[in-house]
């Protein structure tokens, strides 16, 4: 950034405690980690995605983005699923998941990690 440019200030609608929770991420129980092949999943990344879903003040598009990221991290979506999601984005200009796609990720979180998002 040159001296003539003003820094861009982004206002966050978060409490300091919410930001701290997002930065720390949600703890995934050790027994769940062991059961799910720890070398296959990035639990730290999943924990941060879960915390961001819970504590960031996001609209539905932002929440769907996080659910999609969790789905990709957990290998829940096939290449065909991702192509469908991208095609909807190209066609409508908005990123969104279908209700079934959302439910697939939410069910996985509940069943495999014991995490309740709502």
Image (cartoon, helix red, strand yellow):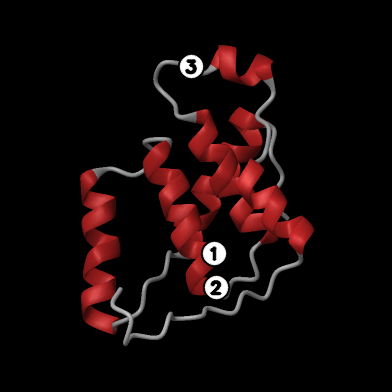
Closer to the N terminus: mark 2 or mark 3?
Answer: 3
Q: Are marks 2 and 3 in contact (CB under 8 Å)?
A: no
Relative height, residue 35 to residue 108 (above, below): above
Q: Label 2, label 1: how many angstroms apart (C-alpha)?
A: 5 Å
Look at 69% across and 39% down and name the residue there.
115
Looking at the image, which is closer to me, 80 or 54?
54
What x and y, as percent, mark residue 109? 60, 39
Q: Are marks 2 and 1 in contact (CB under 8 Å)?
A: yes
What x and y, as percent, mark residue 111? 63, 32
Crowd class of label 2 (few under 14; some 14 to 19; many from 20; radius 10 Å): few
Looking at the image, which is closer to me, 69 or 114?
69
Relative height, residue 67 to residue 115 (above, below): below
Looking at the image, which is closer to me, 93 or 11?
11
Closer to the N terminus: mark 3 or mark 1?
Answer: 3
Q: Label 2, label 3: how many angstroms apart (C-alpha)?
A: 30 Å
Relative height, residue 115 to residue 21 (above, below): above
Look at 69% across and 23% down and name the residue there.
29
Number of the label disc, if any, that sits on residue 63: 1
Which secondary structure lies at badge 2? helix
Number of the label disc, if any, that sits on residue 41: none
Q: Which residue is mark 3?
A: 38
Q: Kindly indicate the quadrant of the structure image that contains residue 32.
A: top right
Q: Which residue is mark 2?
A: 60
What x and y, as percent, mark residue 61? 48, 72
Left or right: 92 in relation to 42? left
Q: Are marks 3 and 1 in contact (CB under 8 Å)?
A: no
């Amino acid at each position: 950034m040159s001296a003539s440019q003003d820094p861009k200030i982004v206002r966050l609608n978060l409490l300091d405690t919410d930001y701290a929770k997002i930065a720390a991420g949600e703890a995934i129980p050790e027994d769940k980690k062991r059961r799910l092949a720890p070398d296959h999943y990035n639990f730290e990344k999943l924990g941060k995605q879960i915390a961001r879903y819970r504590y960031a003040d996001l609209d539905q598009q932002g929440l769907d983005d996080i659910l999609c990221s969790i789905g990709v991290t957990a290998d829940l979506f096939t290449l065909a699923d991702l192509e469908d999601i991208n095609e909807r984005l190209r066609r409508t200009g908005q990123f969104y998941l279908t209700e079934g796609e959302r439910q697939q990720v939410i069910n996985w979180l509940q069943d495999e990690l014991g995490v309740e998002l709502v």
